[in-house]
Image: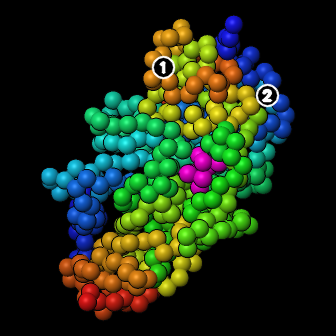
Amino acid sequence: MINKVFHTAAEAVADVFNGATVMISGFGEAGSPVELIHALVDRGARNLTIVSNNAGSGHVGLAALIENRQVSKIICSFPRTLISVVFPELYRSGGIELELVPQGTLAERIRAGGAGIPAFYTRTSVGTPLAEGKEEREFGNQHFVMEKAIQADFALVKCQTADRYGNLVYNKTARNFGPVMCMAAKTTIVQAKKIVEPGEIDPECVVTPGIFVKRVVEISNPADESKLVAEERRYPWK
Amino acid sequence: MEIKDKVGWSVSEMAQNVARDIPDGSYVNLGIGMPEMVAGFIPEGREVIYHTENGLLGMGAVAFPGTEDPELVNAGKKYVTAIPGAAYFHHADSFAMIRGGHIDICVLGAYQISEEGDLANWSTGEADDIPAVGGAMDLVAGVETIFVITKHTTKTGEPKIIKDCTYPLTGKNVVSCIYTDLAIIDVKDKKLVVRKLAPGVSFEELQQQTGAVLYPNP
């Protein structure tokens, strides 16, 4: 029998190892798997390479993971938010490496990683500093840069509804990077607001088919990151 | 809201100028900040669908206080709404809409624009700057028509429209039209052609505040 359900976030991330590459879904707080990230803070794996659109807000979620000095490198399109303090400070002091990637290139590199495509050409970033050092090629009188796929050891993803097969449905703009990250990691770990019986999700409406998912854990009342940030909370909780 | 300068257009009037050039039925992506204002000025009778690159086609107005949903945000991470008939999708699909040329018009802000339509709008290149690019480079590379809405000069009065950008580029030869507080300027065949002057602004005055050669509308 296939049963991908784990009972706690701690169990679900228990094998994340030092030096792992970890994708983390979310666009700001929307879709950020805060409880899984906090479990990773507790787990304490270090020297991680994180792939995520942003670099966290306040002192919770991804920002807490960075503040706990578990992240040596981040691959990211927009490492700034109105209330990001942890990443900018660490970056300016040379404590974290940044690979800045245009957002569409980031999504496509992850998608390619999940689809077995080692690299692709895109017009994005041609003629800009972000194309420096990359192979360029002409197709039909237009210039393109080569971008390489990204794969990960783990992906931490948040969704709305899952079943024991790992079929997923998301909520509104919290979907963002979730579906492509699920495809691109060896071990995809998902926190779902609700786990339902197989068949309860209409097969026509499954967004991420279960084959891309290894573990699901129900977090029925996930934290609102913006609320935690506004309350100036810090993880680990004090 | 309406701050009238002695000469030139107000920010609302600038947004109105942009809105007037967005045809009925367009799929439009609005950048963060001043570009977002454009949605408020689309002439009556035109239907425009807004794309936000974090995965929503058919973005509606900003959410009313008390009805915000932290999982329904726009590219600027503001709480928004979705119109009836909207669609959600993941990031690779969203950027396929952009990079695949499916979005008709994108409106962006600018630090600098060159006379050939190069755009710099993501980094000042300063040493302590935290570089953040987001979707800007994808938008200028993938969307055929790029409108830029910006004050004509910086806060200290330096021209923003210059021969060559000194800040790191977002894209080369990408800008179609520039809407400032002083003029509407089309980029045609790598030349800056003044389509319309704001009230109280002469061509000579405009040229003085511009760091690149301007051409009058033929």
Using a 10 Å C-alpha cutoff, classify the residue at mark 2 as few (fewer than 14 neighbours), some (14 to 19) or many (20 or more). Answer: some
Residues at marks 2 and 1, CA–CA distance in whole angstroms: 31 Å
Q: How many marks?
A: 2
Q: Is residue B215 left or right of residue B32?
A: left
The disc placed on residue A26 is none
Q: Is residue A63 visible?
A: no
Q: How is the image coloured?
A: rainbow
Q: Earlier in the sequence, mark 2 or mark 1?
A: 2
The amino acid type found where label 2 is placed reads: Val
- Quadrant of the drawing holding the C terminus of chain A: top right
Q: Residue furthest bottom?
A: B204
For the point 60% across and 37% down, the residue is: A180
| Subunit ID for the residue under disc 2 | A
For the point 17% across and 57% down, the residue is: B43
For the point 59% across and 68% down, the residue is: A139
The amino acid type found where label 1 is placed reads: Pro
Which quadrant holds residue A132? bottom right
Callout 1 secondary element: helix
Q: Position of residue B154 (x, y in %)?
A: 44, 74
Q: Position of residue B142 (x, y in %)?
A: 48, 60
Q: Magenta residues? A: A102-109
For the point 64% across and 27% down, the residue is: A212
Q: Residue furthest right?
A: A18
The disc placed on residue A16 is 2
Q: Is residue A85 above or below residue B64?
A: below
Q: Which residue is mark 1?
A: A203
Which quadrant holds residue A236? top right
